[in-house]
Image (cartoon, helix red, strand yellow):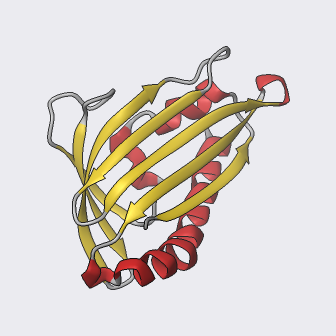
Amino acid sequence: MMSDVTVSIDLNATPAEVWAIVEPVEQHVDWMADAVAIRFETEQTRGVGTKFLCDTKIGPIKLVDHMEITVWTPATATQDGAMGVKHTGIVTGSGVFSIEPLAGGERTKFTWTENLDFPWYLGGRLGEIIGGKLVLGPIWKRNLRTLQALVDAR
């Protein structure tokens, strides 16, 4: 069984403007409190097939998250955007950022969904419930508020 966590926020920017902020994967550390550093494993740094390592720290737990981009759909005035990843390290599963227009396209709904499987030594199923819902959800909600501040400051 995997932990399913979904958080979302409405942003005062067009989908294309939001995409421009989340598209540079290496800059996710600017708005994700749990992402310490990102190191690319592939020459490409954008698009499907891009592989990277994300040094992750949540409280006392530090791990390297191995990720590969599986979905890459830039948001435009006429197209919803999405960036999806597959987690293949200690924590496995998948995640996706969805970018959808609101209010005639002048505002955007940004949704972050993760389906994660934790190893036994991080609590297994109990870790998924506690880690996913009670720890990661609030951290990611805070991350979205930081993303909102970046969007508002653009």
Q: Is residue 91 above or below residue 122?
A: above
User: In which image quadrant can residue 110 be found?
Assistant: top right
Q: Is residue 61 above or below residue 87?
A: below
Which residue is nearer to you in this view: 26 or 105? 105
Q: Is residue 111 above or below residue 6?
A: above
- x and y percentages locating residue 117 in the rendered image: 36, 65
Q: Is residue 56 above or below residue 53?
A: below
Instruction: Identify which residue is drawn at 50% across, 70% down.
Output: 136
How many numbered badges does the structure rendering display? Answer: 0
Which residue is nearer to you in this view: 12 or 50? 50
Quadrant where the N terminus sits is: bottom left
Quadrant where the C terminus sits is: top right
Instruction: Identify which residue is drawn at 35% across, 84% down.
Output: 123
- x and y percentages locating residue 55 in the rendered image: 26, 62
User: In which image quadrant can residue 125 be found?
Assistant: bottom left
Instruction: Identify which residue is drawn at 60% across, 24% down.
Output: 16
Horizontally, residue 56 falls left or right of residue 75, namely left
Q: Residue furthest toward the front?
A: 1
Horizontally, residue 149 falls left or right of residue 135, namely right
Instruction: Identify which residue is drawn at 59% across, 71% down.
Output: 138
Q: Residue furthest toward the top?
A: 78
User: In which image quadrant can residue 57 be found?
Assistant: bottom left
- x and y percentages locating residue 146 in the rendered image: 58, 57
